[in-house]
Amino acid sequence: MAARNRGLDRGIDGVFAMAMAAAAWLIVFGHRGVAPCVGAMALAAAFRREIWSSGLQLVSPRRLFADPLSIAAMAAALFSIWIAMTALWSPTPGAQKLGLTVGVSFLAGGALVFEAARAGGGQTARRAVLYVIMVSTAAAALMFEGLSGGYLRGVIPPDDQTLERWKDLTALGRGVTALAPLVFPAAVLLRRITGSWTLAFAPAALAIVAASQFSVFANVVALTAGCIVFIIAVARPRSCLWALTMIIVAAIVLTPFAAAAIPSDTLFDGGANTLPASWEQRLSLWREASMRGLGQCLPWGCGADYARAWSLEGGMISVSGSPIPLPEIPIHPHNIFIQIWLELGLPGVAAFATAAIASARALARAQLDERTIAAICGAVSACFISVMLEASVWQVWRLAVFALAAFGCAVSYSANKS
């Protein structure tokens, strides 16, 4: 039995090593590829029998109302099931697949956390080094690409001579989006490996330089917010964790009400020319999506991926700073909380908020070390900015990034408890 377990450990470690090496490359050259990497790691972890027995115990009726982790798991399951149920009225087909995708993403994240948190000292040390190498390599490459105008993308075949070459740089910006939450668990692991906080912040510094070179402004905000919250959490970990939880829950509940109150006529007609056209469009989008979400889509929501059907209506708006009309709505509202209100209604909001609160309670009861809490707070802050400014719950690669960040935090926990 022991020999077989060692063989399984080696097999899982091999898959993890290959997946993290691939993720380092794909964060730079194909951010959507992060999802298959996380999927491969989760499948490898699923060969461990203990993960199934622990998962079944987690959702047993006996634990459901006593264990916040069980409550979080059940709320996540209900959230995924509700997504699939909205297929009954969603104007866009495929809600069942979306519900399955979100559910599998939750399971993958849970599998990676389970595997990392229960690893032995040798396994944890190897994974810590691999995680740091993955994040540091991707951060250095993205910084180089930003400062060189995408040199590596230009010289790696196939040679792209199209007029839409600029999309490569936009994709690099998405690579920074994928990297942003990962630099905070990497910082804790680097601090443990090197003993230096200066070296620990190197990947974050590289990522901030990279973010400043691309057009995704949310990345700069996410990394800056993550760094500030990380530093606060190092000093006051549990206070920071609860404050962050309250901010997130307040955002889940209040964001659509705040967005619906945006005085769009005054804003757009009253001399708000200092805003970029894309931000004027986004404010209008948030306002209109929130008004629909709080109006015609209550209480059940208009169905998963409703925004895609809305975008096909072809509505256009005029904003200052743009010589041409812009779409009233793209294929999603660029804010996950508004999207949940719009498409999943009150049941989706309730399930999501319950999962968030229960997860925070589970973390508070887990006796985590201060540095791991700081890694969690930094990563969650970066994710929160992305959720508020640009993300969609249907983007699988973003869900995979959240899972990979959770894995890094679990490796930090395992490393610091030894």
Image (cartoon, rainbow, N blue to C red):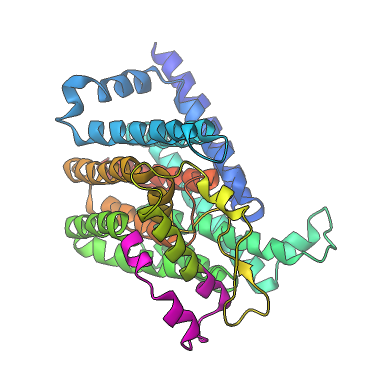
Front-most of residues 240 and 315: 315
Residue found farthest to the front = 296
- In the rendered image of this protein, does residue 321 appear above or below residue 305? below
Which residue is outermost to the top? 1
Q: Residue at x 45, y 78 (%)?
A: 265
Q: Is residue 190 above or below residue 71?
A: below
Magenta stretch encompasses residue 274: yes
Q: Position of residue 46 (x, y in %)?
A: 45, 24
331 drawn magenta: no
Q: Position of residue 191 (x, y in %)?
A: 36, 57
Q: Where is 96 relative to 188, above or below? A: above
Relative depth, front residue between 162 and 238: 162
**Numbered disc total:** 0
Determine the residue located farthest toward the bottom in the rendered image: 271
Q: Which residue occupies 37% across, 66% down?
A: 259
- Picture coordinates of residue 149 (x, y %)? 70, 71
Residue 326 shown left or right of residue 376 in the figure: right
The magenta span reads 256-281
Q: Residue at x 43, y 42 (%)?
A: 403
* Residue 59, image x, y percentages: 27, 24
Is 288 situated left or right of 321 in this image?
left
Q: Is residue 166 above or below residue 52?
A: below
Q: Quadrant of the C terminus?
A: top left
Can residue 371 be seen here? yes
Predominant SS along the magenta part: helix
Name the quarter where the N terminus is drawn. top left
